Image (cartoon, grey):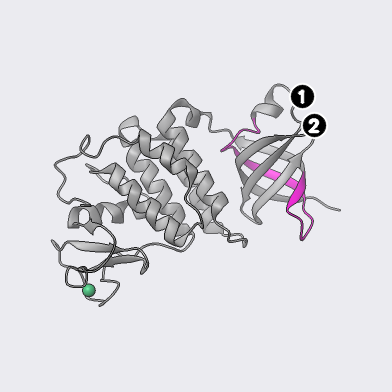
Amino acid sequence: MAAVRTPAVLLRAHDYGDSSRILRFYTRDHGLVSVVARGVRGRSGKGATTLASFASGELSAFVKPQRELHTMQDFHCVRIRSGLAGEMLRFAGASAVAELVLAHTEQEPQTAVFDALEGTLDRLEKALAAELPGTVLAALWSITEAFGFAPQLDPCVRCDEPLGHDEIGRFDFAAGGVRCAACGEDAAGGRLGPGARRQLESLLSGEVPEGLAHPRRHLALVSDFMAYHVVSRPLRSLRFLGGLMPPDDAIGASAGGQADG
Ligand SMILES: [Zn+2]
């Protein structure tokens, strides 16, 4: 049987038996692929360190259809991204991104998800500390968007009328977007002011908005949205991540809009 070769990002690894490891990759050509890497644990030096989470490279594996676990032939690491381990928030952000990709049940390979994953991990590794909260939020939103679940911010998800420049909308999680003020009365989600809406727009395109206000509320928003549309259970890494985010009024408190409630 010939091995398949595909660009791949290592999302998670754990020990298996005496000397092997089970590795879970997101691959460009085959989506999520779990492999057993035999005899790698006794290895020291380069071979072992490149099998660390968030490394990118070329995976060769013997992939059998209808199987959940395949056999790795080789992983040629191109980028280790060891910088992600340097800071708790950086590492927690990357872990949340990995958990999000692992928790999504879509089995078909999605090139957009692979590209978004590579891009967000690179940005998380290199972001300045001050921009880290926004970079983490942008990472979660851009993976969500790559899965095909971007929220509709304008026009209103119920009446289809455009929202006014200063209009305070309300998030409707079930409908997957924002309701205008007139339709917002009985929506269950929180208020979303014009400033927060524009910041959310930046985050969705993978950009860190200037003067990002209320990072914890933004994290709650993306968490709730993912729970509705992308994953079937809450992600464990998000609770940990929430504790590392700066308090809501610590940065950019003077920014125009507020994601009230
Ligand atoms: Zn409306």
Q: Is residue 89 left or right of residue 21?
A: left
**Ligand 1 sits in quadrant:** bottom left
Q: Secondary structure at mark 1?
A: loop
The residue under the point 20% across, 68% down is: 185
The residue under the point 22% across, 34% down is: 250
Question: Is the residue 105 above or below the residue 70 in the image?
Answer: below
Which range is magenta? Answer: 50-71
Q: What mark, if any, has residue 42 been given in the picture?
A: 1
Q: Is residue 149 covered in magenta?
A: no
Question: Is the residue 95 above or below the residue 159 in the image?
Answer: above
Disc 2 marks which residue? 39
Question: Is the residue 233 above or below the residue 169 in the image?
Answer: above
> Furthest-right residue in view?
1
- Percent of width and height locating residue 14: 66, 36
Give the crowd class for mark 1: few <14, some 14-19, many >=20 residues within 10 Å: few
Q: Amino acid at mark 2?
A: Gly
> Furthest-top residue in view?
44
- Percent of width and height locating residue 62: 79, 50
Confirm or reject: label 2 Cβ below 8 Å from ligand 1. no
Q: Amino acid at mark 1?
A: Gly
- Percent of width and height locating residue 137: 37, 46
Q: Is residue 68 covered in magenta?
A: yes
The residue under the point 37% across, 48% down is: 138
Determine contact: label 1, label 2, CB under 8 Å: yes
Q: Residue 126 appears in which quarter of the rendering? A: top left
